[in-house]
Amino acid sequence: MTPRDVGGMGEDEFRKWLKSVGLIPNKPEYDKGGWDFFVQWPVPQGTAENTLSLDQLPKPISCLIQVKSSDTGRTPEIKLSNWRHLCLDALPSFILLLNFGGGISPQTVHLIHMDEKWISKTLEKLRNLPASESGNLHKISMKLSPTDADQINPPYPEALRNKIEAIIGSDPAKYFEQKQRWIKDVGFDPNESRFSLTLTVSSEGDKNAEDKLVDLALGQIEDLSAIRSEIEEIRFGIPKPWSTSDPRDMAIKFIRFSGEKIKLSLRDQSGARYAQVEGEFLSPLAIFPFLKKESLRVRIKTKYADFILGPASRRFQFRSNSIDLDEEMALREIGNYADLVATLRDNSVPNLRIHVQFKEGRQFSLGIGHPNFGEPTPLDLEFEKAAADAWSIARSLNLDPETMVTARELHGFSQHLGTVRSLLDAQETTPSISLHGRAESDFSPDSLIGAALTTATFIGKTLIVVGAAVYGQPARTETPACDQSAFHIQSPIVKIVLREIIDNASEDNHPMAPYSERVVSWMLSQGIQPLPIEGDDWSAK
């Protein structure tokens, strides 16, 4: 019995289907391209009613199809060279499987689209082969495995056309762009590096190669000189040479640094928290995971300062950032930073520890002792103190922590901020205080005398006025040279009588006399004799 030409039967059936639905099957004269038919759709014809210009008519659809026929229904092995042609060609490509089952008409039909899945499988198969096999792809095969979703049902001509049109869509250019993205992007893990770079970094002076890599990863140096010996592209998890050029000198530079969000706090040995700021945690292991523990340093980056911590050596370095005098900043941010720096500068806190809390919950704590800041400038100290004073006042008076301030404003009101804070922070009793003023009469040792102290400051656009009475039993000392009597109050009481908060206040003159009168009135109601003093001539000891 003469064997059936099932392949020819399949191609004849395919031609008949296409012609019956108005499509154009083109058979290559020289069949070496991995496809059997170049299929064209008719050129769209416009009408006078719906066509504004003939050059704007829709583009016709076309595609490549390879036809595979059998009597058994077994899925065929297809040459890798054909897979490559179909998957990498810019046109939409399909494989049509016809199972005749021994009859004269197909019993089952499957249309397999060379989509992202098959492009990925084909490129991964090619990636696994050595480059020396490029001329032998026709000797290597890959099995086709259709799914139920690939099956089409009678009437086959209409079903075939409808399915191809649904896959390609009405705009062939958009399909082309999508297929190019598949070809370009498959095999690359978005969470992994696309390249593997082999570099030689030399030691320099007292810096070994690992120290220099740490400096680069933490952004402490802008770039790093190295010799590139090899660069590989990693696709489907398989590294392959990306360049064949010889080793060459190059500079490594990172454009952007970003780390994990953290909260950094300073605590004592008992766990009591002194200050806390938000920032980013940068570890060189995120870039160079091979670094040794002995070389490791981490950077904690905040808006106003950077902290470099060496966990192995427990060395702690502090580096403040320059601040724009006119940049608005939230009082909470700058106040917390000032508290943190003040704690670091305060040598009276024993066993200081740095505590880092990561956003997802993990944390670590490390003893750091006290860092060496070097000599701070007077301007730095004034700004840090003014910010700490403003933040302390805000917390005492329940001001909005998001109040916006500038460094220039804090500098300008630094003395006023310090005075207001000292009154708000005053203890119930102070060891000794001197009040200077002319005495109108003698005071008995059992009497109570005092002074009304009022002061004010701005925090942002908010005016804060604080009035206090400082009083107690007097001890008088004559000072003939200036014709005054000095009254020394032992164990005085400091009583905050008024706290005024005026939002959106202007910076015009705000007389203190009305506020002083209110404090004096309170003192008189308490049987306290006000001692007249001139201006702000008072001092606390």
Image (cartoon, grey):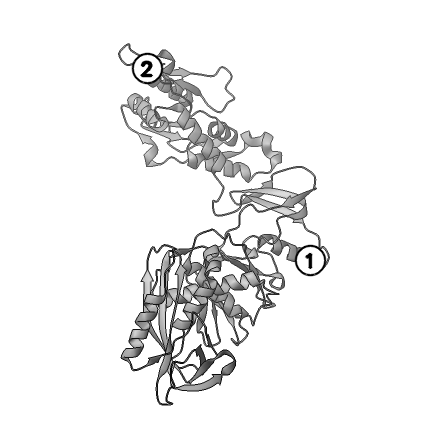
Image quadrant holding the N terminus, namely top left
In the foreground, 525 or 233? 525
* Mark 2 burial class by Cα count in 10 Å: few <14, some 14-19, many 20+: few
Between 527 and 501, the residue placed more toward the observer is 527
Which residue is located at x 56 percent, y 71 percent?
370
Q: CA distance from mark 2 to mark 1?
A: 74 Å
Residue at the (49%, 14%) spot, across then down: 29
- Mark 2 residue type: Gly
* Rendering coords of residue 161 (x, y %): 32, 22
Which mark is nearer the camera, 2 or 1? 1
Rendered image: mark on residue 208: 1
Outermost bottom residue: 445
Secondary structure beneath disc 1? loop
Residue 523: horizontal and vertical position, in percent? Answer: 31, 77
User: Which amino acid type is shown beneath numbered disc 1?
Assistant: Asn
Residue 18 or 212: which is nearer the viewer?
212
Along the horizontal axis of the image, is 271 left or right of 51?
Answer: right
Asked if residue 69 can be seen in this view, the reply is no
Measured as percent of width and height from the top left, residue 506 is found at 36, 54
Give the number of marks.
2
Find residue 345 and report its image quarter.
Answer: bottom right
Decide if residue 315 is on the left or right side of residue 493. right
Rendering coords of residue 55 (x, y %) = 38, 13
First in sequence, mark 2 or 1: give its number.
2
For the view shown, which residue lies furthest in the top direction?
Answer: 48
Vertical side of 106 occupied by 432: above or below: below
Secondary structure found at label 2: loop
Question: 62 or 375, which is in the foreground?
Answer: 375
Q: What numbered label is drawn on residue 22?
A: 2
Q: Is residue 108 left or right of residue 490?
A: left
Dot label at residue 133 = none
